[in-house]
Image (spheres, rainbow, N blue to C red):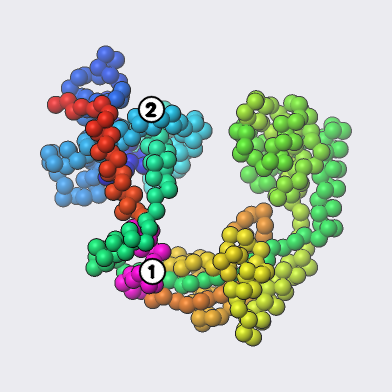
């Protein structure tokens, strides 16, 4: 079953139809309604739009093909059933989630067409109307996604499932592209006490200057290390409770409008916070962020530490044991630094060059590493072995086959679930 996730599909539906999703008593001609699902309806224009998208992807298809139109209608009925079930189960999405998804999809469409102005030209409507017309459709998309996640997020293929999947499909599975088994040891850069003290003292001086009559916005523009807010005077806008760092949020909610906090430490550095407005569940603040600097000496200490480990591995020590003992990245430390099997073509250019120039068992020089922006550091890479392109086998590719088997199991369970929804929930096709 195909899933609708692109605003381009929704826009195509409007182009080919133009009817609004209203019941007959609200003005929609009865002949435009092709199906009813719970309290929702499916219009002929909905089907037309989906058919046009399918034809764009499959030029040999015909718009008036009865079998194609029936498949599209069945897909739309299934989607509406899932949304109806989500509503019955009190699953909800926030306006913020809808807006975020809307803007993401519009940005993808703008990249496709070149600009929002071009989108308006192509579809003959303003961006304001596009956003207004499709809010409800995007809300339905998100409801469907959340319903599926709740129902199937914990589905996983067991050993019997994986072996059965492999026996059934092994002759038709695509070749596994070249991959490399990598591990790494991470060392974060620890700023000196002097650097931390300097950042704290500067944040105190900024606070004192603002209280003495200085402009908070001017100080944010001059000093804040948060590039996303500095140019706007440090303004974060309204943020829901639970979305900010706990120490920042706790200090901010304790303020009164206009009040300025003492310096507040988070993993990003020290913040001077001014409360603009708050409700029981949201807060509007602005801040000046002072990051704790790292000297060249701090960086050298981390790099030298890893150089020593590299030498020990080259002299015969176990990389896996050293990673378990010394790596500071908790997510990989317990697995001996293992990063898994990574498709070589998907590595960043610089890393790909380094890895392909190494031999199996080789260790790289220390490289900058910042998977977490609050923890800059270095890491050394260990190349276990390269796996050339090959047909998948359970011995070498169990994880990849497990993922495919899990996806197939999820599809099968979803199909069975939808069939149950069709038996227990109200829907009908209107000819």
Does the stretch in magenta take in 325? no
Provide the residue designation for mark 2. 88
Seen at 71% across and 31% down, the residue is 253
Task: Return the disc, 2 or 1, that comes first in the chain's sequence.
Answer: 2
Seen at 44% across and 32% down, the residue is 91
Q: Please provide percent x and percent y for residue 95.
A: 49, 30
Seen at 21% across and 50% down, the residue is 58
Q: Is residue 86 left or right of residue 292?
A: left
Looking at the picture, tell me which residue is in the foreground, 89 or 388: 89
Q: Please provide percent x and percent y for residue 88.
A: 38, 27
Q: Please provide percent x and percent y for residue 176.
A: 35, 69
Residue 237 in view (yes/no):
yes
Seen at 78% across and 63% down, the residue is 295
Residue 46 in view (yes/no):
no
Q: Is residue 299 left or right of residue 74?
A: right
Which residue of the protein is positioned furthest toward the top in this rendering?
25
- Image quarter of the N terminus: top left
Instruction: Name the element at disc 2.
Output: helix
Q: Please provide percent x and percent y for residue 288.
A: 74, 42
- Image quarter of the C terminus: top left
Looking at the picture, tell me which residue is in the foreground, 348 or 321: 321
What stretch of residues is rendered in magenta? 389-405
Q: Is residue 184 above or below residue 376?
A: below
The crowding category of the residue bearing disc 1, from other C-alpha atoms within 10 Å (few below 14, some 14 to 19, many at least 20), is some
Instruction: Name the element at disc 1.
Output: helix
Which residue of the protein is positioned furthest toward the bottom in this rendering?
315
The crowding category of the residue bearing disc 2, from other C-alpha atoms within 10 Å (few below 14, some 14 to 19, many at least 20), is few
Residue 327 marker: none
Provide the residue designation for mark 1. 397
The prevailing secondary structure element of the residues shown in magenta is: helix
Cα distance between the residues tagged 2 and 1: 41 Å
Does the stretch in magenta take in 404? yes
């Amino acid at each position: 079953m195909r899933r609708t996730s692109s605003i381009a599909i929704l826009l195509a539906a409007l182009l080919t139809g133009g009817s609004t999703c209203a019941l007959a008593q609200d003005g929609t001609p009865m002949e435009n309604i092709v199906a009813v699902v719970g309290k929702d309806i499916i219009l002929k224009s909905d089907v037309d739009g989906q058919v046009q998208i399918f034809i764009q992807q499959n030029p040999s298809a015909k718009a008036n093909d009865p079998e194609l139109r029936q498949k599209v209608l069945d897909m739309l009925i299934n989607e509406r059933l899932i949304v109806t079930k989500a509503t019955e189960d009190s699953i909800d999405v926030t306006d913020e989630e809808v807006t975020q998804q809307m803007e993401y999809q519009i940005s993808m469409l703008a990249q496709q067409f070149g600009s929002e102005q071009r989108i308006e030209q192509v579809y003959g409507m303003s961006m304001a109307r596009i956003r207004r017309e499709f809010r409800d459709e995007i809300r339905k998309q998100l409801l469907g996604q959340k319903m599926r996640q709740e129902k199937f997020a914990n589905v996983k293929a067991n050993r019997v499932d994986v072996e059965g999947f492999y026996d059934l499909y092994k002759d038709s599975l695509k070749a596994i592209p070249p991959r490399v088994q990598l591990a790494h040891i991470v060392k974060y850069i620890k700023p000196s006490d002097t650097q931390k003290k300097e950042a704290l003292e500067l944040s105190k001086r900024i606070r004192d200057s603002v209280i003495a009559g200085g402009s908070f916005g001017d100080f944010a523009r001059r000093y804040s290390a948060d590039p996303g807010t500095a140019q706007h005077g440090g303004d974060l806008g309204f943020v829901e409770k639970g979305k900010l760092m706990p120490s920042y949020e706790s200090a901010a909610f304790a303020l009164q409008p206009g009040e300025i906090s003492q310096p507040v430490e988070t993993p990003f550095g020290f913040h001077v916070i001014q409360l603009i407005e708050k409700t029981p569940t949201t807060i509007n603040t602005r801040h000046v962020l002072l990051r704790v600097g790292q000297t060249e000496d701090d960086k050298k200490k981390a790099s030298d530490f890893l150089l020593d480990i590299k030498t020990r591995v080259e002299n015969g020590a176990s990389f896996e044991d050293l990673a378990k003992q010394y790596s500071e990245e908790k997510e990989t430390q317990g697995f001996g630094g293992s990063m898994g099997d990574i498709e070589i073509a998907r590595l960043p250019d610089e890393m790909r060059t380094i890895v392909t120039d190494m031999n199996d068992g080789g260790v790289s020089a220390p490289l900058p590493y910042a998977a977490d922006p609050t923890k800059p550091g270095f890491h050394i890479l260990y190349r276990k072995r390269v796996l050339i392109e090959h047909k998948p086998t359970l011995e070498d590719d169990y994880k990849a086959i497990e993922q495919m088997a899990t996806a197939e199991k999820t599809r099968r369970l979803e199909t069975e679930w939808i069939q149950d929804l069709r038996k227990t929930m109200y829907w009908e096709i209107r000819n």
